[in-house]
Image: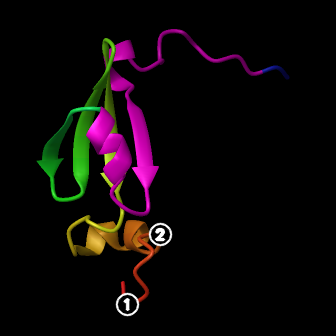
Amino acid sequence: MEVKPSSENLPEKSEFGLYAVSARVPIKLMQSFHFEPVMKGVYDAQWGSMNIRVVAFSEVADNPRNAIWQLFSAIPKK
């Protein structure tokens, strides 16, 4: 039995985005590109016509829903 994805159930193009993740804040990259803060540890960067959401794990808010991200923050006590 062959299973093929249905084009009727596919997400819209607008539901996709580009994300970059980093253990620490990418300081040198921030010097080259304009980063707009969205919330603590989350930035938007414009690359040509594309928007890239950058998440710096070491800066994300101390919140239970961010616990998995904090494992990768490079901060031992988190």
In magenta, the rendered stretch is 3-32
Please state if 8 lies on the left or on the right of 65 as rendered: right
Given the image, on which type of amino acid does mark 1 rest? Lys
What color scheme is it? rainbow
Residue kind at label 2, given as amino acid type: Phe
Q: What label does residue 11 carry, if any?
A: none
Element at label 1: loop
**In front: 73, or 35?**
35
Residue 40: percent from left, percent from top: 16, 59
Say which of 76 and 2 sits in front.
76
Q: Sequence order check: which comes first, mark 1 or mark 2?
A: 2
Question: Could you tell me which residue is drawn at 40 percent across and 66 percent down?
Answer: 69
Res. 77 mark: 1
Judge left or right: residue 54 versus residue 68.
left
Residue 3 is situated, as x and y percent measured from the top left of the image, at 74, 21
Kindly indicate whether the residue at mark 2 contacts the one at mark 1 (C-beta within 8 angstroms). Answer: no
Marks 1 and 2 sit apart, C-alpha to C-alpha, by 11 Å
SS assignment at label 2: loop
Q: Where does the N terminus fall, quadrant-wise?
A: top right
Q: Is residue 69 above or below residue 12?
A: below
- Point out residue 78 in the picture as x, y percentages from the top left corner: 36, 84
In the displayed structure, would residue 26 be above or below residue 1?
below
- Front position in the image: 14 or 62: 62
Q: Position of residue 41 (x, y in %)?
A: 24, 57
Magenta span includes 29: yes
Q: Which residue is mark 2?
A: 72
Q: Residue furthest bottom?
A: 77
Question: At x 37% / y 90%, what residue is drawn?
Answer: 77
Q: Is residue 22 magenta?
A: yes
Instruction: Spot the residue most to the right.
Output: 1
